[in-house]
Structure formats: C-alpha cells, structure tokens
Amino acid sequence: MTPASTGASTIVGAAPSVSPSDSRMTPGGPGYRRMSFALFLAGVATFALLYSTQALLPLISGEFGVAASEASWTVAAATGGLALFVLPMSALSERYGRRTVMTASLVIAVALSLLVPFAPSLTALVVLRALQGAALAGLPASATAYLAEEVRPRALVTAIGLFVAGNSVGGMSGRVITGWVAQEWGWRVALGVIGAIAVACAVAFRVLLPAPRHFRAGSLRPLVLARTVRDHLADPLLRRLYAIGALFMTVFGGVYTVIGYRLTEAPFSLPQGIVGSIFLVYLVGTVSASTAGRLVGRLGRRGALYLAGGTTAAGLLLSLAGSLALVLLGLVLITAGFFAGHAVASSAVSKAATSGRAQASALYQSAYYIGSSAGSTAGAMAFHAAGWAGTVGVGVLAVLGVVTITVSGSRAARVAARRGPVPVH
C-alpha cells in the first residue's frame, strides 16, 4: 500500500508478488464462496442485532414515555458496549482463533436477543442491549483479521467489501422487518423475530466458514497487547484511518437514529411499517461496499475517500428538503457514501498492519462504534434542540473532519516522498 493512495507517512515499495504456491483463498478458488457467504451472514446477524431497536425508537419512546434522546440509548448502549470490548475480544482471537471467537460471540449475542423483547423497563432494555453489543465485539475485528490471513492481498478489499455488504443487508433487513412486524404486533415481537433470524445466521455461519489455515496463535500477555496497541496508535496512517471510520459512522449513526422520528412526524406522518421500509436504501450500501475495491483501483484510496465524503455531504444537504422524494434521495447518497468510505478505510487498516492485525482492526472497530454511539446521541440531542437541520449540521461537521484528515494525509505523503523511501514499520 503506497502513501500516494492512502496518505501514509512512510514510503512503501511495490506490492510483493504472490507466489504460485500461495494457499490463501482467492475469488473463484476453493472455499472462497463458502467463506464469503459465511462472513456475509455474520455481517447480517451483527448489524441486524446491533441496530434492531433503531427503527423502533418512536414506539419505544411512546411505551416508556421518554424523549428521542433517552430512547436513543438503546442504540448507543449496544454500539458503546461493542466499542469497549472489541479490543479485549480481539486479543482472545489472537490466542484462541478467529473462528472460535466469532462463533462464541454470535452464540452469546443471539441468546441475549431472545431476552431483549421481555425487558420490563427502559433501563433493563438499555442494559441488555449493552451486553449484546459487548458480546458482538468478538466478531468485526476477528472477521477482518481472518480475511487478512486467509485471503490473498489483491482480493482483500473485495472480500472485506462483501463482509461490509453483509452489514448493510443486516442493517436494512433488521429495520424493515421490525418496522412491519411492529406495526402489527408491537416492538417486542419485532425484536423477537430479529433474534430468530440471527439464530439461523449464526448456525449457517458456523457450518459454512472454512477452518483457518494460516492462523498462528499469539500471546495473551497484557504487556505484549499494550505494546501492540501502542505501536498501532503511534502510526500516523492508522490514526487517520481510525478517525475517518469514527467520523463516517458519526454521520450514519445520527441520521438513522433520528430519521424515524422525522418521518413519523408532520409533514410526512408515515406509519411505522413504511418508515421501516425506508431502510431498503441500505441496498445501495451493499452495492457501494462490494464495489469499493474497483473504486480504489480507479481513484486511489484518498480519491475514493473524497468521493465517499462528497457523496455523503450531498445527501445530508439534500435531506433538508421538504419533499419526501428528495429526502429519500438524500438517504440514498448518505448510505452509498458511508458504506464506500467504511469499506475503503477498514480494508486500508488490514493492509497497513503487518503484525497484530486483530488489534489494528479492533482499534478501528472501537473508533467506528464510538462514532456510532456519539452520532446516535449527538444526532438525537441536535434533533431535540433544532430539528432535522440540527442533525444534518452534526453530520456535515463530521464529513468536514473526514476531508480535513484526508488532506492532512496527502500533505504527509508529499513530505515523505520528498525525503525519499524509508523502511516500513
């Protein structure tokens, strides 16, 4: 990976050639389709569970008599729990294996999903959601580390894009299904249905995912983990990628936490089922994430990030319109830009980390979900204070942050190029 395409602060030589004897998976090769589908289903289950309450927030507010900013904690607690535990879980995956940790995470998360519908109070619901997020923490970083180890480098962006595409399908289907089920039978039944779907995904994932062939067990010693984390945080490129992931997710978390309130209120006054169906725009994210590799190939990573940020900002501004059609078009652009930016940034992290990949990915995931929690909370508070324009303002500031960081990476790359090649960390 070169600074010209990523904003790295060091010069990297030409990409290493792949040996004909390389046994890692590649598109069309043995096990690749099974692996892709298994991780796609894991992505579906993760996002369906993680954001299962997001489309239901107006109903949860109504039942418990709370404002949007309070109900939004059912989303923020889950993403916050994931952000807090993703690093320790990644350490476990270095010791016990990616597939083992991913399987355990899904089993615990789906078990909790069967308890969530019976929460007697908002506090109990928030606690269960935080535990669910903590359980899911073993999946995202372990999945990207698994791919980095088991897939050939040239296919890595595409493979991670497919995993991210599963995230988008899970996020979409979870919200659409809960919207229509809740309209007929209430939000508790809707959450139970999502739990049943997640159980099916977890079983299929475990059956389909090939056993790892290139995993080498690492150490659980705290000092080793602390040194690895310190080294990653000292890398300017990784720091920029972590910040970019957090800022993109700040936009996305804020928009999709609040959009249900906007569309159920005047002038739109849409029923819950229709509001849930709005999340079909996630299909756009499926396409943009899965094509991220081609986008990087044409524009370079920085160019792809500029395009993703610009698309997201355009969608935010368009969503201010009073026309439902223009609001939906704005959501399409926001979704496409977000998923493309996320796929580009997360794949860059996996390629940039030459050791401790699970920890590098975990730090990205932690920043990413901190962004989600911050976006959910800030977006809801801004909506309470200034309406939809307030939520859009939060999003625009986050996009400006993405652009600023990417420009900073470009400048760092030019400085490094003038100094000449230096060894990669």
Image (cartoon, helix red, strand yellow):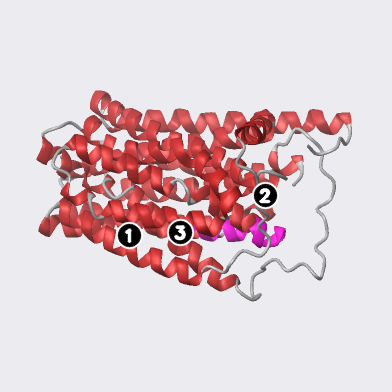
Query: Residue 310: x, y in percent?
Result: 52, 40
Q: Nearer the viewer, mark 3 or mark 1?
A: 3
In whole angstroms, how far apart are the C-alphas of marks 1 and 2? 31 Å
Magenta segment, prevailing SS (helix, strand or loop): helix
Q: What element carries label 1?
A: helix
Span shown in magenta? 149-165
Which mark, by number, is residue 84?
A: none
Q: Is mark 3 on a helix, strand or loop?
A: helix
Image height of 246 relative to 114, above or below: above
Left or right of 143: which side holds 396?
Answer: left
Task: Say which amino acid is labelled 3.
Answer: Thr
Left or right of 417: which side holds 264?
Answer: left
Q: Nearer the viewer, mark 1 or mark 2?
A: 1
Q: Which residue lies furthest to the front in this view?
A: 221
Which mark, by number, is residue 103?
A: 3
Task: Say which amino acid is labelled 2.
Answer: Leu
Image height of 140 relative to 421, above or below: below
Query: Residue 137: x, y in percent?
Result: 45, 45
Query: Residue 391: x, y in percent?
Result: 33, 31
Query: Residue 352: x, y in percent?
Result: 70, 44
Residue 320 appears in the picture as rendered: no
In whole angstroms, how far apart are the C-alphas of marks 3 and 2? 36 Å
Which mark, by number, is residue 299?
A: 2
Q: Which of marks 3 and 2 is in front?
A: 3
Which mark, by number, is residue 173?
A: 1
* Label total for image: 3
The residue shown at (64%, 48%) is: 350
| Mark closer to the chain start, 1 or 2 | 1
In whole angstroms, how far apart are the C-alphas of marks 3 and 1? 22 Å
In the picture, which quadrant includes the C terminus?
top right
